[in-house]
């Protein structure tokens, strides 16, 4: 049992299952040895027990591993581990050609031709290495997300056919060549036939032969001529139709001999679409009508299997017999056929042939009568096919309006685009807080946009709201923490407070806490340290203040005053400050303010000693009592509790702290009456409110002191 996370071959870790087929399941895996993702094809249980098949499977896979080409899904490894037989291949992100045709209905001529050329080049490389695919079909052709076309599953068909695997396991009989369904030897020309059927489906949207059973389809490959693809696509270029005809000839001698010739004609058709350059070999008019012998029809009808490929020694016999009959049968000589049928069996087969002939004659009479209206048995599948063919399809260049698919289920969207002849392609899931899981949450082409019919609309499905684990950003810088959270889709808010434990600018705490499950877009609050409140202070906004008030506000810093002429700022007012407001810097740091001198007047010089002037105290005057009588406005976060006030002043180069008030309730606006240190004209007042048992800072205010008269 293969499970996600399982290690195969001591190097390949199973990531997820991505597909399943008749013979194998496909997994995405991580190659830990080369550190890359790969595709791993694991054989199903019923094939693991057949040692003969396993031996052939390994031989063919190893042969395919030697093939490297841009249009081939490269095989990296083949092996066995714990009874699991696997092939490791290149991982190609994209969709199969079958899915692409299903989504678009049918492809444009240029697109179909381009894909056919790339497939042909991949097959040509394989044929040059002696490898025949034997199962070319749209399901084994991948179109990658970057537009590259790659052929996959080389070698598996040969291993299967040589072990008599039934056709429903090998793949669809819709694309099998006559010699394959007959059970004869197949070579490069069988791949050319299957490529022709694939091209037919690309340009028409249907396969040429349909039936109720695989047996019925196989017999049509052997006996019926296909309808011209131009019946379904009237504007199909003549040259491309002739290329399809030549690829799908029932006689191998009338097909292209090599892929090189197919590529040359496909490229020529792009230059000369209506040219008559494809040469079909004439029919052999001397040849006899082919009647399939009992063993051929029994092998198809009775067992519904592809017969075992003849041994290599019989390959020349097959081609020798082809010289006598263009379909590879010589009915006149028992020895040449090599079938060993005895006389009694031959008589029985002859009688059976007459019976079959009579039945066919009866069927023909019924069909002719039904067509003439003599009988009424309901429409046949072929009639339905004709009616479908006659249904008018839109012109390729016709424009339609892109529908709004957002909020729809995939089933609803598929029905909508189908009616408009548009394609639909899933790209990926994305989280959405608006649309429920499984609904289309975005589309690549905006609704209402005019596009050509058969255009493919890419869409994304909602995976629901994203639940994310909040990372731990405590201890990181504010800038780093914000970037980390915003990159994850969270909204961030910042609060700041002083701290003795965290450096300034460092995240101290977060709400919600780290590890909490949250959705993208949720608010995360970071508390950032302003540093030690006695060592750092926030720079206030002093622009517009007069010089004296600005100095008082910047009392915690070393203020440098510069002057400048200004026509817009009044004389004596601060025009600019060197450190912006709100920034926390170390106390005592130098801050330069620029004061306006007005429209060009020279600042008044200070009076000489002994001359007139104001009565302000001399610098260094430490006599008398120094008072602050400023008024405090109501703090924005004040709730009416008891308050505490602290005054911080710089005395002899060191901060001095004095508790002015504690455990009292006051009314705002509040008139201060504070006595400061003698001779110190500035200070900072810190205001706290008691919340529970702790004091929480409401704010701090620069205040000034003057000598009392």
Image (cartoon, helix red, strand yellow):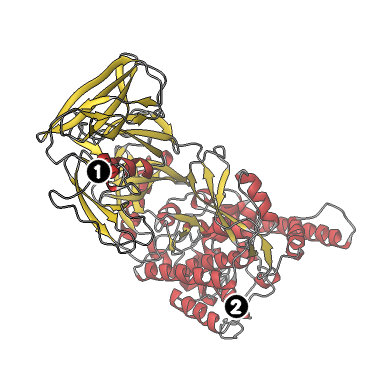
SS label for mark 1: helix
Q: Earlier in the sequence, mark 2 or mark 1?
A: 2
Residue 510, position in %: x, y? Answer: 33, 30
Q: Give me the C-alpha separation between circle 2 and circle 1.
A: 95 Å
**Closer to the camera in the image, 266 or 190:** 266
Give the label, 2 or 1, closer to the camera: 1
Residue 107, position in %: x, y? Answer: 59, 66
Q: Is residue 166 left or right of residue 661?
A: right
Assess disc 1: are there few (<14), some (14-19) or many (≥20) residues with their C-alpha within 10 Å of its C-alpha: many
Residue 469 makes an appearance in the image: no
For disc 1, the marked residue is 551
Relative to 304, does residue 470 appear above or below in the rendering?
A: above
For disc 2, the marked residue is 242
Relative to 253, does residue 446 appear above or below in the rendering?
A: above
Disc 2 and disc 1 in contact, CB within 8 angstroms: no
**Closer to the camera in the image, 2 or 382:** 2
Q: Is residue 173 left or right of residue 380?
A: left
Relative to 134, does residue 302 appear above or below in the rendering?
A: above
């Amino acid at each position: 049992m293969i499970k996600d996370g399982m290690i195969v071959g001591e190097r390949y870790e199973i990531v997820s299952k991505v597909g399943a087929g008749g013979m194998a399941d496909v997994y995405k895996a991580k190659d830990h040895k080369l550190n890359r993702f790969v595709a791993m094809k694991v054989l199903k249980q019923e094939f693991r027990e057949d040692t003969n098949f396993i031996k052939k499977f390994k031989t063919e896979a190893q042969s395919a591993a030697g093939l490297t080409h841009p249009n081939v899904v490269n095989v990296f490894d083949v092996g066995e581990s714990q009874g699991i037989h696997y092939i490791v291949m290149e991982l190609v992100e994209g969709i199969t050609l079958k899915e692409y045709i299903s989504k678009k209905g049918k492809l444009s001529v240029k697109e179909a031709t381009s894909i056919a050329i790339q497939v042909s080049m991949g097959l040509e490389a394989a044929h040059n290495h002696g490898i025949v695919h034997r199962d070319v079909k749209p399901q084994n052709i991948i179109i990658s997300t970057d537009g590259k076309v790659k052929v996959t599953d080389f070698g598996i068909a040969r291993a299967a056919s040589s072990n008599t695997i039934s056709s429903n396991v090998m793949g669809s009989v819709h694309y099998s060549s006559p010699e394959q369904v007959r059970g004869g030897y197949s070579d490069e020309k069988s791949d050319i036939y299957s490529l022709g059927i694939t091209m037919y489906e690309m340009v028409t949207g249907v396969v040429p032969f349909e039936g109720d059973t695989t047996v019925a389809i196989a017999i049509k490959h052997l006996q019926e001529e296909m309808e011209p693809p131009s019946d379904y696509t009237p504007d199909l270029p003549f040259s491309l139709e002739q290329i399809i005809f030549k690829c799908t000839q029932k006689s191998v001698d009338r097909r292209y001999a090599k892929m090189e010739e197919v590529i040359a004609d496909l490229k020529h058709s792009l230059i000369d679409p209506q040219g008559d350059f494809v040469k079909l070999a004439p029919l052999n008019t001397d040849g006899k009508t082919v009647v399939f012998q009992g063993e051929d029809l029994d092998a198809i009808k009775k067992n519904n299997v592809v017969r075992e490929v003849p041994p290599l020694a019989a390959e020349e016999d097959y081609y020798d017999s082809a010289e006598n009959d263009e379909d590879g049968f010589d009915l006149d000589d028992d020895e040449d056929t090599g079938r060993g049928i005895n006389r009694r069996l031959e008589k029985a087969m002859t009688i059976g042939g007459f019976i079959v002939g009579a039945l066919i004659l009866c069927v023909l009479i019924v069909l002719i009568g039904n067509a003439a209206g003599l009988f009424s048995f309901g429409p046949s599948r072929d009639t339905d096919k004709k009616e479908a063919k006659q249904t008018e399809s839109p012109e390729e260049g016709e424009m339609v309006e892109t529908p709004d698919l957002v909020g729809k289920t995939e089933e609803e969207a598929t029905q909508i685009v189908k009616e408009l002849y548009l394609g639909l392609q899933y790209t990926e899931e994305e989280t959405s807080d608006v649309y429920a899981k499984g609904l289309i949450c975005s589309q690549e082409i905006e609704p209402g946009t005019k596009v050509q019919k058969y255009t493919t609309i890419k869409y994304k499905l909602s995976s629901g709201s994203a639940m994310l684990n909040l990372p731990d950003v405590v201890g990181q810088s504010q800038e780093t923490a914000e970037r980390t959270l915003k990159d994850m889709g969270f909204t961030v808010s910042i609060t700041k407070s002083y701290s003795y434990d965290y450096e300034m600018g460092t995240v101290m705490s977060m709400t919600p806490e780290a590890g909490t499950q949250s959705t993208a877009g949720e608010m995360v609050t970071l508390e950032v340290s302003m540093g030690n409140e006695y060592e750092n202070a926030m720079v206030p906004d002093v622009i517009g203040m007069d010089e004296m008030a600005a100095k008082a506000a910047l009392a915690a810093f070393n203020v440098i005053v510069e002057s400048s002429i200004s026509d817009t700022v009044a004389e004596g007012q601060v025009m600019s400050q060197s450190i912006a407001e709100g920034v926390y810097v170390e106390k005592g740091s130098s801050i330069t303010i620029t004061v306006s001198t007005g429209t060009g007047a020279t600042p008044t010089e200070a009076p000489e000693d002994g001359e007139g002037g104001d009565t302000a105290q001399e610098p260094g005057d430490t006599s008398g009592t120094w008072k602050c009588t400023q008024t405090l406005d109501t703090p924005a976060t004040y709730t009416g509790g008891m308050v505490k006030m602290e005054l911080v002043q710089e005395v002899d180069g060191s901060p001095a702290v004095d508790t002015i008030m504690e455990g009292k309730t006051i009314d705002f606006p509040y008139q201060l009456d504070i006595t400061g240190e003698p001779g110190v004209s500035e200070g900072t007042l810190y205001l706290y409110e008691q919340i529970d048992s702790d004091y929480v800072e409401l704010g701090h205010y620069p205040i000034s002191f003057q000598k009392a008269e």
